[in-house]
Structures are given as structure tokens and as C-alpha cells.
């Protein structure tokens, strides 16, 4: 479990949810990934197994995402509201990338 005293990991979803995200077995990934309000703050959880570093970009502001050591590929951090953001980072071989996070949007399909 993440260190509850680490402010970088405040608002982190439960360990069992993160484990099932990593294995592709979570029944509702939108309930874990993307932006989520926790009290007055908004936290962002991302699963990007190819990233070694990740930041969320909102306008000119860059919010560092913190790697969750117990769950490789999971990153978590605080952002400003749920407004538009992009993710940018590095891979292990030093390649830079930037993309729109699909989990910043609401799910399109309902129950099938």
C-alpha cells in the first residue's frame, strides 16, 4: 500500500483497484483512471506502462505525476480541476511523447 503520509499520493485509489487495472481485469476503469474529485482537490491517476516519467499539462502549467512504486506503470498526482489536460513523458530509452488521456472523457458506452 502507498505511504498514507506521502502528500504526492493523497487521493490514490485502493491497491486492489490499481492491481486489477495493471492486469486489464478491472470492470470499470473509468472509476479509477482519469481525474477524480476527492474532497476539494482533483487527483489524476494514469496507467502508462511504457512511461518512466509523466506530467499532466494544463495550459502553461505542468503538474508532476508520481510513479506508484507498488504498481509499476501507475502514475498519480494533483491537478487543477477537471479541465482539459494532456500527458507528456519519457520512456526508458529517452523518447519523449505527449498525448490526450482517453480517461479525461466520460465513458461513451453504457451497460451492454
Image (spheres, grey):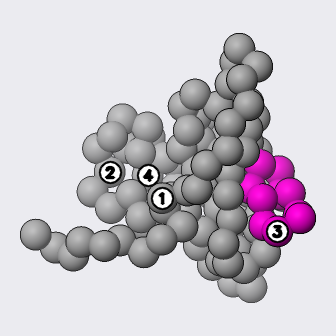
Q: Earlier in the sequence, mark 4 or mark 1?
A: 4
Measure the alpha-carbon separation of dots 4 and 2.
7 Å
What element does badge 2 sit on? loop
| Quarter holding residue 36 | bottom right
Which numbered circle lies on residue 26? 2
Say whether disc 1 or disc 3 marks the residue closer to the N-terminus.
3
Callout 4–callout 2 Cβ contact below 8 Å: yes
Q: Quadrant of residue 53?
A: top right
Residue 75 location, x and y as percent?
A: 66, 45
Looking at the rendered image, the disc whose residue lies closer to the viewer, 1 or 2, is 1
Q: Which residues are magenta?
A: 55-64
* Up-down relation of residue 28 to residue 72 (above or below): below
Marks 1 and 3 in Cβ contact (< 8 Å)? no
Question: Helix, strand or loop at disc 1?
Answer: helix
Q: Is residue 63 magenta?
A: yes
Residue that badge 1 annotates: 102
Amino acid at each position: 500500500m502507498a505511504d498514507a503520509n506521502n502528500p504526492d499520493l493523497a487521493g490514490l485509489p485502493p491497491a486492489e483497484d490499481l492491481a486489477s487495472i495493471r492486469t486489464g481485469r478491472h470492470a470499470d476503469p473509468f472509476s479509477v483512471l482519469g481525474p477524480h474529485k476527492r474532497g476539494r482537490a482533483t487527483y489524476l491517476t494514469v496507467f502508462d506502462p511504457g512511461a518512466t516519467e509523466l506530467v499532466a499539462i494544463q495550459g502553461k502549467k505542468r503538474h508532476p505525476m508520481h510513479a506508484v512504486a507498488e504498481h509499476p506503470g501507475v502514475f498519480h498526482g494533483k491537478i487543477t480541476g477537471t479541465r482539459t489536460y494532456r500527458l507528456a513523458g519519457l520512456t526508458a530509452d529517452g523518447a519523449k511523447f505527449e498525448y490526450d488521456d482517453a480517461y479525461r472523457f466520460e465513458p461513451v458506452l453504457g451497460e451492454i
